[in-house]
Amino acid sequence: MTGYGAGKTDACDERGSIRIMAAMISKIASADEVFQANFQAYEKRIADLHERRRAAHRGGPERARKRHEERGMLLPRHRVEAVLDPGSPFLELGELAGGPMLYEGLPPGAGLITGIGLVSGRPCMIIANDATVKGGTYFGMTTKKHVRAQQYAWRHRLPCITFVNSGGAFLPEQPNIFPDYGQFGTIFHNQIGMSADNIPQIAVVMGACTAGGAYIPALSDEVVIVKGQGYMYLGGPELTFAATGEEVGQEELGGAEMHSRISGVTDHIVEDDMHAIALTREIVRNLGPAPQPRVKPLESIPPRHDPREIYGIISRDTKIPSDSREIVMRLVDDSHLHEFKQEYGDTLITGFARIHGHQVGILANDGVLFSESAVKATHFINLCCQRGIPLLFLADINGFMVGRSAEQGGICKDGAKMVTAMSSARVPKYCIVTGGSYGAGYFAMCGRPFEPTAMFAWPNGRMALMGPEQAASVLWQVKRQNLERDGIEFTKADEEALKAPIIEEYEIFQDAYNFAANLWIDGVIEPCETREVMGLMLDLAGRVPDPETRFGVYRF
Ligand code: COA
């Protein structure tokens, strides 16, 4: 790659030492017709993203929301907003989980809000049941989302604040919530593990909490309950009557007074939601010392090129790949990438940069992965692990090179080296899918199976084993061989009839929103939000030590 050399050499960093500032130079002409057409097409994608978010934020049906408010309770989103430090950001995880793609008629979010926000100056994981969606009960996707939030909290030592308002298990979903690891029981298992690791567990009982919904507060370190509104019991009045014949009201069975004065299950009794929130903020103030940054980040410098220009850089034709250097220079501080091996294996860009002052090692695709680019990635990941620098994978990849020359050149073992390095790395690893991420490329660029610390896609992101047309062609080849073997004649129309539904199915599957609905990614974010999201993630990661990396055996 040429034309992206040093742009300017000047500045000192804040420690006073001279450093080379090689800002990347853009070749983009924003007045260009193609750029403008792409830009307008991408703006439509952004509008669509925000419409989906609005639908998720509305919560359950109007009737349920009205009933919730008539009971004097704040809607779950208002509870979350109220507990956060005024004006501070809230990074939501799994915002579009579930939803109509998986649960017909239900809004996205899976009846749970999870995200990271500042409470009394301290980053916390906030988890809130949405009782306007099927009484706040847990679907399979709800348990998965809760567990994912806990894992993130555990890794970053974030106190968990859970606003509990849940009827427990959504009974028709039994196979997806009850028997297995990663389901409802794992929520409890994680609470206990985190508590043992001195990661505070705070629960606020804000509505009816039954069965599993009652165990969440019962397994917390400190519990608040709202008078005349919060109830917790293993079985409600109806179930109790059915099981034992005993007639008992809900106050006596699991009300705030009973639990705070008789059973001792709860620790603080409050008058209403706002009182509960004020008390929660006070509890956070009384936690032990918060993790502090290990290294002070440098001052954040905005990119020299406007991140919004990414809208015009990403082609509206998904078959045309984006220029990844143009993207990188709009994401990193001062558009400065200290590139590693710029002249070698140039289908992968590797280099050191900062985002909001935090150091990060970037790996960005710029074509198919060859042996050279895979070996380069391996070397770069090793470097980052040695130096304790988090990795950011920007995935836009069709896969590894195929063909005789590639195979004879050992693409198998070189690809395996890259995957081994990426998989072994114990520094924080983030993946953002900026285009199409397919096949083994999806794996090598730190796809979900390799446990990225967090993974997001841009609205144009696509992920699948292969593209829709390729999948349809492969399956048609198989079918055609069978027809030929059996001596059955076929026409072009037969081919089209077989291919059309496969293409449609793959189109739906590969969509970023399908990945978000299934929680295969943590969310869909705007290109323009990427710096803020990464800045927050890197800040949190910089406050906890990384486990030591031990690399698996490399195949040479
Ligand atoms: N499984 C499946 N659906 C459930 C459910 C459960 N455990 N609990 C509630 N729902 C559904 C209701 O059928 C209703 O559905 P609809 O909107 O289609 O009519 C919706 O959730 C809201 O329930 P509703 O009873 O109208 O709301 P509420 O706010 O008055 O009460 C609960 C909410 C959770 C307190 C109450 O529904 C309840 O006690 N449910 C049973 C909880 C239970 O026994 N769980 C044990 C799980 S092991």
Image (cartoon, rainbow, N blue to C red):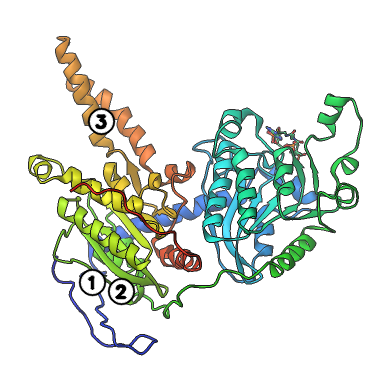
The N terminus, quarter of image: bottom left
Q: CA distance from mark 3 to mark 1?
A: 38 Å
Q: Quadrant of residue 64?
A: top right
Q: CA distance from mark 3 to mark 2?
A: 41 Å
Sequence-first tag of 3 and 1: 1
Look at label 2 and name its amino acid: Ser
Q: Give the residue at mark 3.
A: 472
Q: Nearer the viewer, mark 1 or mark 2?
A: 2
Q: Position of residue 220 (x, y in %)?
A: 71, 52
Q: CA distance from mark 1 to mark 2?
A: 10 Å
Q: Give the residue at mark 1.
A: 26
Do the CB atoms of the residues marked 1 and 2 lie less than 8 Å apart? Answer: yes
Q: Residue at x 34, y 46 (%)?
A: 462
Q: Nearer the viewer, mark 3 or mark 2?
A: 2
Q: Quick one: 408 or 82, which is closer to the camera?
A: 408
- Where disc 3 sits, the SS reads helix
Sequence-first tag of 3 and 2: 2
Q: Quadrant of residue 174?
A: top right
- Where disc 1 sits, the SS reads loop
Q: Position of residue 547 (x, y in %)?
A: 44, 59
Q: Residue at x 17, y 48 (%)?
A: 556
Q: Give the residue at mark 2.
A: 335
Could you classify mark 1 by the number of other residues whose Cα lies within 10 Å: few (under 14), some (14-19), or many (20 or more)? some
